[in-house]
Every structure is written in structure tokens, then in C-alpha cells.
Amino acid sequence: MKSFNNVGAIFKREIAGYFGSPVAYVFIVIFLVLLGFFTFYISRFFEVGQADLRNFFEWHPWIFLFLIPAVAMRLWSEERRMGTIELILTFPITLAEAILGKFLAAWAFIGIALFLTFPMVITVTYLGSPDIGPVFCAYLGSFLSAGAFLSVGIMTSSFTRSQVISFILSVIICLFFILAGYPPVTDVMAGWAPNWMLDLISNLGFLSHSISIERGVLDFRDLLYYFSVIFFMLFVNGIVIQNRKAS
Amino acid sequence: MHKIEVKNITKYFGAKKAVDDITFTVEKGEILGFLGPNGAGKSTTMRMITGFIPPSDGTAVIGGSDIIEDSIAAREKIGYLPENAPVYPDMTVVGYLDFCSEIRGFSGGERKKKVEETIEKCFLTEVKYQTIGTLSKGFRQRVCFAQSIIHDPEYLILDEPTDGLDPNQKHEVRLMIRRMSAEKVIILSTHILEEMDAVCNRAIIIANGKIVSDSTPSDLRAKSPVHGAVSLTLRGTDPEKFLSFVQEINGVKTAKLIKKDTDAFKVRIFPENKDTPIADRIISGVSENKYELKSVFVEQGRLDEVFRTITTSDQ
Ligand SMILES: Nc1ncnc2c1ncn2[C@@H]1O[C@H](COP(=O)(O)OP(=O)(O)O)[C@@H](O)[C@H]1O
Ligand SMILES: [Mg+2]
């Protein structure tokens, strides 16, 4: 109960922080504009046909790649730069509660941005095949991969007091996770790499997991994958903060 | 139980020993001034006591709770004002204090009351709804101070609490600290000697990570070479004659000319023994011999001098 309150207090402060600054609204607008642009313009342009939900969701990871590190970069860097980390870590709360509160707040913020894309989905499904089950699954997949990207971002932001460095590191790591399952890359690797290695690498990647969820297949292993990635990144985040304090 | 015990606390940063085996106990009602030149290790020690950084060796026990073994319980009892008073610039004063009291476990009406009380106590009413980032340094300092006392902690640790305040604000904060002191254990760090003198009833001086002195401010002052000396300003033009006269007085060790003007001069007279007052004898001697006395002053000792001697002799 007490733990719940502590996470809640951190969560509320962070969420209020997002919506108290214009950056949040700018972020949401950029997200929506980019997504609309890619879905309705670029995809259409290539496929010369009807827009389809897959066009809409397949752009998410690429947009997340840049926008989520931008959301996450301030999470610890800013506390470090302002010195407020000294307050947070001397409050009677555990480090896990602080990390979880911050992470959940940022994730909820991205969830809200995702939710606002709903009108776009309605437009697309109106043009294509309307089917609510797969749409829900696709959103879930997108939300989960957003969580995974975010966990990378919050981890890199614990490395440094510079938001820029945190951003770059996190983009690089997320790019690795995307490319690990990206067909053009796996195809090239198939030429020389053994099968087990291909499997391992594409299983580590975000795409192979989000694609199956987005196709409407809710596999326990995919969920487990996302939660393991998130847990691992947050755990490393904790260790980094713990050791930074010591030095 | 009601005390802070610091036991053999030590901190290495790489190969550098920032805090070197510090041990002391502070009891309820004590306001301990933590003094030392910049880089002496004051902040590092406080950061270890509050659990922000783990000690390389030793520990601190706050009201019976070990800051390492039983960290959350220990942190619950502490109010902490870190150096430079960090605050969240994007929050309003009331929002920030509400957050802090929520973290401290208050909810509902009680939380509201705590926030209101603290805002009043720290003279923040006029900026209550203002964003902290737009406040002056003095107000920000007080907002962070408010954060440290919002849960009425028994143990208060203040790292340079009056840094960046103007003289009036300094005075107010010092009064506040004194007012709270009866029921609390307070440790505050400062490099301002007059501050230690005005608020503290005990002073620990550290230099290069080690305790070099632990006493009361007045004992500290008594270590000054000028402690107990009498300074006189007299009208006249012949100080040498006066010096030889005054040296004959019983109990006087030496006398020194400090300053000579056209029609007046100032001398300082040192006693044989610091604890036997010589002022009355000197004054009666002066008036018997018809010297014209302009001012007389018994030196209490100069803290800055003592501070300098103590913190530089031990290099
Ligand atoms: N995080 C750190 N890493 C390395 N050295 C540090 C760190 N923090 C403090 N120091 C060093 O430890 C010494 C004590 O610093 P500090 O406790 O801040 O002194 P004070 O508060 O008395 O001015 C200084 O020499 C400082 O440079
Ligand atoms: Mg300091």
C-alpha cells in the first residue's frame, strides 16, 4: 500500500510535469503529424492503392525511434543536472518505486498520444476493412513496443546528465532492436549467418514480436518478451543510479 | 535513542579520501554547526548521513535506525536540505510541497494542513501559486527548506541553509532554526563563522575530511590569542609612555600599540592569565593617572582567527 502510494506520488508529479510544459503538446502534435504524413502520404505513394491498417502501424517503430528517446531523455538526466536527484534518493522511498513511477508516467503519456491517433484509425478502417479485434491488438503491440523503447530511454538517461548524449545513446540502442528483426537486414544476414543465430537475433528484435501481435495473434511469449526487455532495462537503470551515487 | 550517531564514517572518491573516519554523536536539543573550508568534506558527510551516498566505511544511526541496514526507516525521520537547495523549477510552490508531503505519507485534509502550515512558517504565502523557476534564489532556498521541515522531522540536516540569502532572510532562517531546536537534533553546515556563532550550541570543525575541533562556540573563541585582551583608545600623543606605565599593572603580560592617530592612539593589553580579568585594574590605573579614555573593549576572541589557525595547522 505504501509502495503503491510512493509510486503514485512520483507518477503524478511526472505526469503533471509533462502537461505543465508546452513540450508535451509539441510532442503530441509532431507525433500525430508524422504518423499521418507517413500513413497517408508515403505509404499511399508507394502502394498506389487503398490505405490499410498495416501501413499505419508499421510506421510506429520508426517514429518511436526518435520521439520516445526525446520523451525519456530528461527522466534522470534532468534530476541529475538540477540536483533534485539528491532529494528523490533521500526521500523515504525505494529506488525501484522512483524508477517505476517515472517509467509509468512516461508510458502513460505515450499511451495518451497513441490514443489520440484513434481518429486516424477510424479513417483508415473506413477506407479499408473495419475490424475492431485486430485494431485493439495492434494498439497493444504498439503500446508494448513503446514501453520497450521507453525503458531503453530511461536507462540511458541514468548514464549522464546530458540529455543530448542520453538521446543519442538511446536512439542507437533502439535502432539495434529494430534492425535485429527488420526483414531487409535479416535477409542479408541469412546469406552467411547460421540459422540459430538468425533466430536469436530476430527474436531479440522488437519487430518480430510486434508484427505478430499486430496481426492479431496475442502470444504469451511476445508479451513475456516485452516485459522482460522492460524489466531488464529498468533493472540496469537501478544499478547505474546505485553505482553513480557511490562514486 | 533520540540522537544521531555517526560511527567511523569514511568516504573515498577513487583514491582520494574525502571523509576520513569521522565519529560523533548529536543529542536532542543540540544544534551542531559543521564548519570547515570549502572541500573539507562537509557535504559528503551529510550525504552519507542522509543516505544519498553510501559510505566506504562506517555508518550513521538515526534515532536507532541504521542508514544502511534500515535505510527507509532512517530516511523517514530525517529532513534534509541539500547544498544549493535543489527544487523542481516547473512546479508551483504549493504543488511542490504537496508532492513532498505525499511522499512523506500524508494524505487528504492532513496533507493540506501540513502544506498550508509550512507555507506560512517559511513566509511563502505571497508566492504560493508561483512557478518555482521564476522565484529569486532566496525564495527557492526557503522552498527547499520548507520541504525539509514539512513532516516535522526529529532530525534535521541542513547543508548551508542560508547560502545565497540576503542579511534579513539569513536572520529569519536562523531564527526559525533556533525556534525549532528544542525538540530536534539539528546538524547544519556552514563556512560562515558568525552564523555558527548565532545559531549553534556546538561546533565541529573539519579540515581535509577529519575532525580537528569539537567544542562550543565560546570555547572555540577562547582559543583565540586575543581572547581576554583589553583594547583601549586614549587621547594623547605619547603611547610609549602609556605602554610602559600599563605594563607595570599587576596581571598584565604585555601591551601593544595597535594604531596611532594625531591626537589619539589605540593599545591592546594582554593578561598573564586569560581567566583573570584585568579590565578593572587597567581602568582604575588609567583614571588615577588622568589619562583621557575614549573607548575600552574586552576582546572575546576572533572566531575567524581560530578557524584559520585550526584548519591550516593540520595540513
Ligand atoms: N562525487 C564526487 N566525486 C569525486 N570527488 C568528490 C565528489 N564529491 C565531492 N568530492 C570531493 O570531496 C571533497 C569534499 O567535498 P565536499 O564534501 O563537497 O566539501 P564541502 O562541502 O566541505 O565543501 C572535495 O575535495 C571534493 O572535490
Ligand atoms: Mg559543501
Image (cartoon, coloured by chain):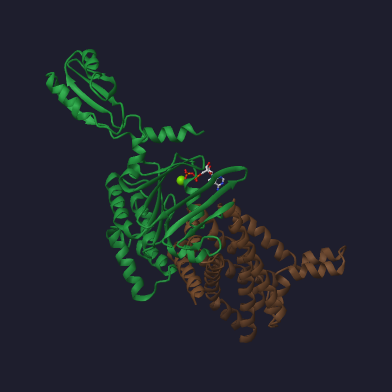
Q: Check the image and report above or below for A72 versus A137.
A: above
Q: Position of residue B204 (x, y in %)?
A: 42, 45
Q: Position of residue B108 (x, y in %)?
A: 37, 76
Nearer-the-camera pick, A155 or B304: B304
Residue at the spot x=32%, y=58% of the render?
B182
Nearer-the-camera pick, A88 or B226: B226
Number of callouts: 0
- Please tell me in which quadrant of the rendered image residue A72 appears: bottom right
Furthest-front residue in this view: B250
Chain identifier for the brown-coloured part of the image = A
Residue A51 seen by the camera: no
Q: In the displayed structure, does residue B64 sit left or right of residue A69?
A: left
Nearer-the-camera pick, B230 or B260: B230
Residue at the spot x=20%, y=25% of the render?
B282
Q: Position of residue A220 (x, y in %)?
A: 70, 81
Q: In the displayed structure, does residue B279 sit left or right of residue A178?
A: left
Q: In the displayed structure, does residue B73 sit left or right of residue B128?
A: right
- Please tell me in which quadrant of the rendered image residue A115 appears: bottom right
Q: Quadrant of the N terminus of chain B?
A: bottom left
Chain identifier for the green-coloured part of the image = B
Q: Position of residue B88 (x, y in %)?
A: 43, 58
- Please tell me in which quadrant of the rendered image residue A141 appears: bottom right
Residue B140 seen by the camera: yes
Q: Check the image and report above or below for A155 versus B55.
A: below
Q: Check the image and report above or below for A108 versus B89.
A: below
Residue at the spot x=82%, y=68% of the render?
A198
